[in-house]
Image: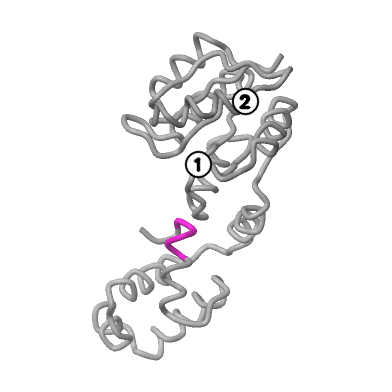
């Protein structure tokens, strides 16, 4: 029997998940509405798998995941968010998998079973995102600085004046950024860097 703890700040979602997870080898042993409550319930109930939402009050799902994984249970993120930075933060925190809430019941049950066996589960749409994130070389401090000023709407000339470098040097930094991120323009560079958590 696989024992499951449901964590989501919406009671209706938790109730709906309980209704979905009806299988011979699954048992929902409890639920929690916040990251802090999830940590407490995981310690008390010792589930095999924790189904974790990401965005919650008090403590988010990533912080809760980092605290829970060291105590035994596998954490499977189930969320509506699929930005590169969300996925990578969850995986870095120790999550065994990452699924979206539009997953089918069959896929969700299969993912829970896989997580319980110690396997990693990623929704197909996320595999490319994670691989791309891992393969992206980091931006240098100067490249990140230039990109932050681009995000503020500054022109190359204005960036050069602000950083006391020539316009040609600004262009060189931007070309390196475009190359590292696999993009061809300023807007795409800012958007991609933000998605990947490289730019705040």
Residue at 62% from the left image edge and 61% from the top image edge: 132
Mark 2: give few (<14), some (14-19) or many (20+) Cα within 10 Å.
Answer: some
Q: Which residues are magenta?
A: 193-197
> Which residue is labeled 2 in the image?
21
Q: Which corner quadrant of the image does residue 3 belong to?
A: top right
Residue 79 tag number: 1
Query: Count of labels shown?
Result: 2
Residue 152 forms part of the magenta stretch: no
Q: Earlier in the sequence, mark 2 or mark 1?
A: 2
Q: Residue furthest bottom?
A: 168
Q: Vertically, is 25 above or below 98?
A: above
Front one among 127 and 152: 127
Residue 194 forms part of the magenta stretch: yes
Q: Residue furthest top?
A: 44
Q: Secondary structure at mark 2?
A: loop
Q: Secondary structure at mark 1?
A: strand
Residue at 64% from the left image edge and 19% from the top image edge: 48
Q: Vertically, is 119 above or below 159?
A: above
Observer-side mark, 2 or 1, equals 2
Residue at 56% from the left image edge and 45% from the top image edge: 102
- Report x, y in % for residue 43: 50, 12
- Report x, y in % for residue 115: 69, 30
Mark 2 → mark 1, Cα distance in angstroms:
16 Å
Q: Is residue 122 left or right of residue 57?
A: right
Q: Is residue 153 left or right of residue 118?
A: left
């Amino acid at each position: 029997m696989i024992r499951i703890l449901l964590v989501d700040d919406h009671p209706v979602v938790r109730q709906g998940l309980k209704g979905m997870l009806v299988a011979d080898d699954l048992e929902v042993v409890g639920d929690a509405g916040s990251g802090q409550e999830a940590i407490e319930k995981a310690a008390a109930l010792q589930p095999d798998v924790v189904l974790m939402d990401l965005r919650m009050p008090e403590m988010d799902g990533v912080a809760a995941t980092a605290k829970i994984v060291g105590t035994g249970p596998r954490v499977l993120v189930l969320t509506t968010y699929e930005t590169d930075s969300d996925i990578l933060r969850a995986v870095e925190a120790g999550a065994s998998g990452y699924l979206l809430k539009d997953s089918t019941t069959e896929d969700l049950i299969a993912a829970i079973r896989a997580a319980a066996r110690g396997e990693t589960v990623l929704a197909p749409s996320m595999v490319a995102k994670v691989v791309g994130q891992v393969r992206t070389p980091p931006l240098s401090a100067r490249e990140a600085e230039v990109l932050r000023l681009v995000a503020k709407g500054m022109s190359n000339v204005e960036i050069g004046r602000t950083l006391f470098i020539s316009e040609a040097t600004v262009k060189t930094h931007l070309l390196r950024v475009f190359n590292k991120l696999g993009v061809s323009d300023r807007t795409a560079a800012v958007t991609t860097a933000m998605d990947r958590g490289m730019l705040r």
